[in-house]
Amino acid sequence: MHDHNREDVIMHPLRARKEKMLPGAGLLFVNPTEARYAMSKVVTDGGNKRFLFNSSLCVNSEETFFVAGPAVGAPMAVLCMEKLIVLGAQRIFLVGWCGALHQVLEVGNVLLPGQALCGEGTSGYYSSDQEPRPSADLIVWLRETLAQSGMAWKEGRVWSTDAPYRESQKLLARLRREQNISAIDMEYSALCTVAHFRGIEFAACMLVSDELWQKQWKPGFATPAFCKRSQELSELLMTAMGARE
């Protein structure tokens, strides 16, 4: 078992002397394609790039929100989140993809994840809670943002894993049946856990990129329709962040 309250932890997230503080809210993009698109949009609109080690970071021209990413996998996503927090982030929205375990979720659907189930290895070093939750206030904001745009969404539990190529039909069926899991990803549960540990607000908005409820894997992330949907969602969230008070 891990002692989550130890005070003798050796390494801590640090703000370098020349690093500027960030706006309090921003978007963390998991996938490289979406992250590049978001960075390009922000820079084109007058934003400025900043350093974020193995990832990227931009702040919009009015300095009211930031975009960061990519951050694939729980360890990398947590590294990014820890740095964003030490630079001043207090409200972080994850924008990612997920694989659907239920027939009601199809490629291109928007999912707002609720209670997570930890299947990755990072969360255990922060908390013994295996079912962390997102910020209720941020979920409300996401619902309102999607509703105002006319973009439909669904909600459900998400299981996060470190091993996407080791998902058997039996395992996924058990998660769906016993834990009421709607979808799977690689980062969500760890970020929920760290956000609670660090005392910030966190929520996520995901696109269904794969259907795993059929007998055969149905990937959809390379289709033109999915790519178009991805850009629409990214633009919607960035526009809403810019208008957010």
Image (cartoon, rainbow, N blue to C red):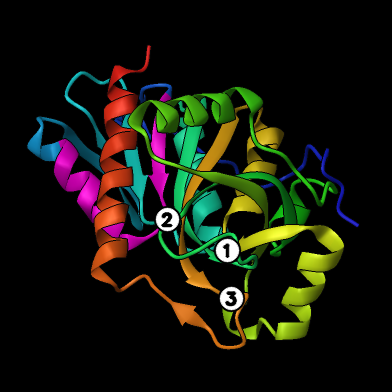
- Mark 2 residue element: loop
Looking at the rendering, which quadrant does residue 7 occupy?
top right
Disc on the earlier residue, 2 or 1: 2
Measure the alpha-carbon separation of dots 3 and 2: 20 Å
Q: Which residue is labeled 1 in the image?
A: 186
For the point 64% across and 65% down, the residue is 102
Is 24 drawn above or below residue 68 in the view shown?
above
Inspect this view and state whether residue 20 appears: no
Front residue of 69 and 181: 181
Q: Is residue 62 left or right of residue 5?
A: left
Q: Which residues are magenta?
A: 25-42
What label does residue 38 carry, if any? none
Given this view, does label 3 or label 1 mark the residue nearer the observer?
A: 3
Image position, residue 170 (x, y; %): 78, 83
- Mark 1 residue element: loop
Q: Is residue 86 left or right of residue 39?
A: right
Looking at the rendering, which quadrant does residue 146 occupy?
top left
Image position, residue 38 (x, y; %): 24, 46
49 magenta-colored: no
Is 218 drawn above or below residue 159 in the view shown?
below
Q: Are marks 2 and 1 in contact (CB under 8 Å)?
A: yes
Looking at the rendering, which quadrant does residue 140 occupy?
top right
Q: Which residue is labeled 2 in the image?
A: 30
Which quadrant, please, contains the C terminus?
A: top left
Measure the alpha-carbon separation of dots 2 and 1: 9 Å
Disc on the earlier residue, 3 or 1: 1
Q: Which residue is labeled 3 in the image?
A: 212
Front residue of 30 and 127: 30
Disc on the earlier residue, 3 or 2: 2
